[in-house]
Each structure stands twice: as structure tokens, then as C-alpha cells.
Image: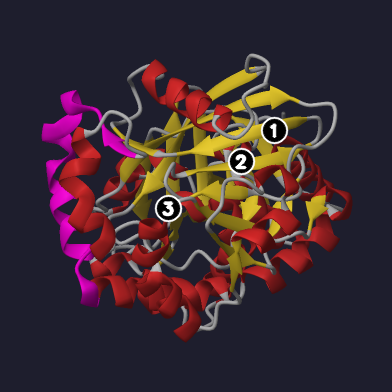
């Protein structure tokens, strides 16, 4: 790792997929870039996700269907949406905002905003695949939702209609058509919803390593350090932390779930909370599935990856400090065995932290207090999907270009 320069043109706080994509973009333009993170690049939620580039995922987490079921979801320990009750007092302001954002008008506005950003996701990924040499890690087999109960399929009608209105490419499938796509699921689906344009990655860790290598090959520097202090002034932005003292002309905050205190020091109170995400992996000699599959009633994804099946998902609200909840891991294990009862014991398990905002929209754009601080965090379940388009928007901000996309993601909305 490079030693800390006294000053740099652009410092990016956070080396997850958003920070890596932004560093690659800016370094490719000839900018002087320093990427700061206490951990290995891409080792957090960028590593542990379901591996889907989900250009279809314009429906916000908060919506009327979730709002209607919210008391049941929060009280049921087997629910895919849960919270740690010890954190309820801390979470209360976020939950109030979440409820408001789940009302019909807000849901529609949030879906419209996300659809505008997602429409650019696949073209932006196409560019980044070429820049970082990721072609062999991409799988273009689409993504499949499986509905095992007629009631779940009926409840999804409004979401399907809104996606169709917003131009999402989706296909409703019969049980036989589900079985034709995924023979091992032939006995489980009453209906399917297929997103044929979706891409998934065969190894998220390898993707992150190549993004880091491509960014450093273009001149970006990587530093292992924690940024705990941020101050703005006429001379730029000062960053500090244990063993860290950096002055930058511009700073990009892309620290994921750990971005809120940094944004507060920049002058913005962002209602960011943490979704604790889990995954299990099972070693496989041959792929069990051809593409990512989401059993809608269970709320997780089963994604075939190199030599393994990854089962990832569910939502647990509850902060950064508590250890992994074994009940959430057991929930994933029981769920996947409904489809594949002969799986061996999990080969690995993981807990990571998603940055979650009540309206499911990330924060992208300059701080209200200082144009030298640029936000790029809060992507929730869409960090992998939105990384390259976020990087493009951050570069536009630095270039002083206007973008019609940015207004919906400004920190000024809070």
C-alpha cells in the first residue's frame, strides 16, 4: 500500500465497489486519486452480495405491500424482514421515515427515480467490464423470481404493472416455463417472473480484485487507514484518523454503511441506517442452477457461483456492532434446503452491512455545505448494480456538468 501523501487532488473514502468504480473512472481520466479504506478493497458488502446486476430492481424496499405486512414481518422471527429489538430506539426515526416512504405516492416517486438511474446501469457496466477486463466473470442468463403460492403472485401484480410502465423488461412464466429454465425447480413454482437482461457475476471477490488492479494500473493509490475526521475550508478538505493526515481538493464519501458520521462532519444529516446482510455458501461440483433465483416467499437469492451456491439476502435492521445472528443464518439454511435437501454443510458464512435509506434512493452529488465534498453512498441492495453509473455521475459533478439524474438523489431531499 502507498504511504500517505500530504495532499492529493481527489480522495475517495471507501474501497467498496462504489469507491473502486469511482477510482477507476477518475484515474482513467488522468486525475490524481487516493482511495482510503481500513480493509482490503471490496471486502465488505461488495464481496458478500448476491452477485446480481439487477437493472430491473426499481421497486423500493418500502412500498404499500411491505407497509401492510410490516407488523407481521417485524414480529415473525422467520420473516425475511426483521430488526434487532435492542436497537429499536435508535431505529425509530428511520422507521418513521420508512413508513412514510412506503405510502403509494412516495413509492411511485422512488421507483421512478430508481428506474431512471437503473436505465443507465447496464450500459455503464458494459464500459467498466471492458476497462477492468471482467468479461470472463460475467454471466448473462437473466434472473428468475419464483412464486410458490398463488397469493404471492397475485400480491405482486402492482409491482409488475409499475415495472412495465417504467420500461423494465420482464416476462411472466408458467410453472412449466420455470421448469424449462431451471429443471431442478420444476416441482416448486406456480408462477415465475423472468428478467432476461439481468447479469450476474461468477465471483464477486475476483471482480473487486480486478477493479482495484485496474484502478491502480491507471495511477490510483490505495491506503489502508480509517478516516474519522473531516473538515472543509478554503484550502480544500482535511481528512484525519489514526496515522492519517490528508488534504484533498475534492473528497468522495463512498464509505457505505459507515458514511453517516462523515456526512455529518461535512454538514449534512443523512438518515442512513444499516441493513445487516447474511450469506451462506455451499460447495458444488456442478451448478445447481443456471442463474440467480429468488423464491419470493423466502426473500433471498440463490446464485450459482464458481464452485459453489451462494444463498444471500433477507433484511435485518440493527446497526454495525452486534455479532452475527445465528437465527438469520439458520433461516437461510432451512430455506435453501427446501429446494436442495441434500446439500452438505455450508462451506462458509458471512455477515456484512448494507447502507440503507428510507426511500431506497442512494445519495449522489455534492454536500449542501461544501461543493468539495461529494456523496456516493446509500445504495442499499443495489451497490453492485449502480457502481459504474454512480462513478460516472461523480465524475460529472467534479467536471461541473449538470445531470438531470442527480436531483432525485441529492442530500437536499432530507
SS of the residue at dot 1? strand
On residue 6, the disc is none
- The residue labelled by disc 1 is 309
Crowding at mark 1 (Cα within 10 Å: few <14, some 14-19, many 20+) = many
- Rounded to the nearest angstrom, the CA distance separating label 1 from label 3 is 24 Å
Mark before the other along the chain sequence, 2 or 3: 3
- The spot of residue 364 in percent (x, y) is 44, 64
- The residue labelled by disc 3 is 149
Query: From the viewer's perspective, is 215 left or right of 391?
Result: right
Mark before the other along the chain sequence, 1 or 2: 2
Q: What residue is at 34 percent from the left and 71 percent from the top?
A: 110
- The spot of residue 128 in percent (x, y) is 76, 61
Query: From the viewer's perspective, is 48 left or right of 29?
Result: left
Depth order, front residue of 236/220:
220
Question: Mainly helix, strand or loop, the magenta region?
Answer: helix
Crowding at mark 2 (Cα within 10 Å: few <14, some 14-19, many 20+) = many
Are the residues tagged 1 and 2 within 8 Å (C-beta)?
A: yes
Magenta part of the chain? 81-105
Residue 70: in sight, yes or no? yes
Q: Is residue 295 magenta?
A: no
Crowding at mark 3 (Cα within 10 Å: few <14, some 14-19, many 20+) = some
- The residue labelled by disc 2 is 302
Q: Quadrant of the N terminus?
A: top right
Q: Quadrant of the C terminus?
A: bottom left
Q: Residue 375's quadrant in the figure?
A: bottom left
- The spot of residue 125 in percent (x, y) is 71, 64
- Rounded to the nearest angstrom, the CA distance separating label 1 from label 2 is 7 Å
Amino acid at each position: 500500500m502507498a504511504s500517505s501523501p500530504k495532499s492529493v487532488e481527489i480522495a475517495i473514502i471507501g474501497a467498496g465497489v462504489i469507491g473502486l468504480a469511482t477510482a477507476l473512472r477518475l484515474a482513467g481520466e488522468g486525475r490524481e486519486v487516493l482511495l482510503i479504506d481500513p480493509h482490503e478493497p471490496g471486502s465488505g458488502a461488495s464481496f458478500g452480495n448476491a452477485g446480481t446486476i439487477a437493472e430491473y430492481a426499481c421497486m423500493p424496499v418500502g412500498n404499500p405491500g411491505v407497509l401492510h405486512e410490516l407488523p407481521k414481518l417485524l414480529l415473525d422471527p422467520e420473516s425475511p424482514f426483521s430488526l434487532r429489538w435492542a436497537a429499536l430506539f435508535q431505529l425509530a426515526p428511520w422507521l418513521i421515515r420508512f413508513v412514510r416512504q412506503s405510502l403509494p405516492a412516495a413509492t411511485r416517486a422512488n421507483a421512478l427515480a430508481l428506474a431512471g438511474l437503473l436505465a443507465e446501469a447496464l450500459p455503464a457496466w458494459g464500459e467498466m467490464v471492458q476497462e477492468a477486463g471482467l468479461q470472463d466473470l460475467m454471466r448473462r442468463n437473466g434472473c428468475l423470481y419464483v412464486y410458490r403460492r398463488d397469493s404471492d403472485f397475485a400480491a405482486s401484480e402492482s409491482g409488475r404493472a409499475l415495472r412495465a410502465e417504467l420500461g423494465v423488461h420482464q416476462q411472466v412464466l408458467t410453472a412449466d416455463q420455470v421448469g424449462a429454465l431451471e429443471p431442478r425447480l420444476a416441482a416448486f413454482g406456480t408462477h415465475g417472473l423472468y428478467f432476461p437482461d439481468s447479469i450476474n457475476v461468477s465471483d464477486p471477490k475476483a471482480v473487486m480484485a480486478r477493479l482495484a488492479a485496474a484502478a491502480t494500473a491507471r495511477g490510483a493509490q490505495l491506503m489502508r487507514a480509517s478516516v474519522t475526521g473531516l473538515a472543509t475550508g478554503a484550502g480544500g478538505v482535511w481528512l484525519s484518523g489514526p496515522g492519517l493526515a490528508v488534504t484533498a481538493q475534492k473528497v468522495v464519501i463512498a464509505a457505505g454503511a459507515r458514511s453517516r458520521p462523515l456526512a455529518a462532519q461535512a454538514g449534512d444529516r443523512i438518515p442512513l441506517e444499516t441493513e445487516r446482510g447474511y450469506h451462506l455458501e455451499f460447495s458444488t461440483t456442478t451448478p445447481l442452477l443456471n442463474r440467480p433465483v429468488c423464491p419470493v416467499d423466502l426473500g433471498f437469492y440463490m446464485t450459482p457461483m464458481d464452485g459453489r451456491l451462494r444463498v444471500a439476502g433477507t433484511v435485518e435492521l440493527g446497526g454495525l456492532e452486534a455479532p452475527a445472528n445465528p437465527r438469520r443464518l439458520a433461516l437461510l439454511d432451512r430455506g435453501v434446503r427446501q429446494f436442495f435437501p441434500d446439500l452438505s454443510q455450508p462451506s462458509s458464512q458471512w455477515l456484512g452491512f448494507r447502507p440503507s435509506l428510507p426511500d431506497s434512493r442512494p445519495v449522489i452529488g455534492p454536500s449542501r455545505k461544501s461543493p468539495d465534498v461529494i456523496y456516493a453512498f446509500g445504495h442499499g441492495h443495489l451497490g453492485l448494480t449502480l457502481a459504474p453509473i454512480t462513478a460516472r455521475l461523480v465524475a460529472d459533478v467534479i467536471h461541473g456538468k449538470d445531470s438531470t439524474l442527480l436531483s432525485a438523489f441529492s442530500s437536499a431531499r432530507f
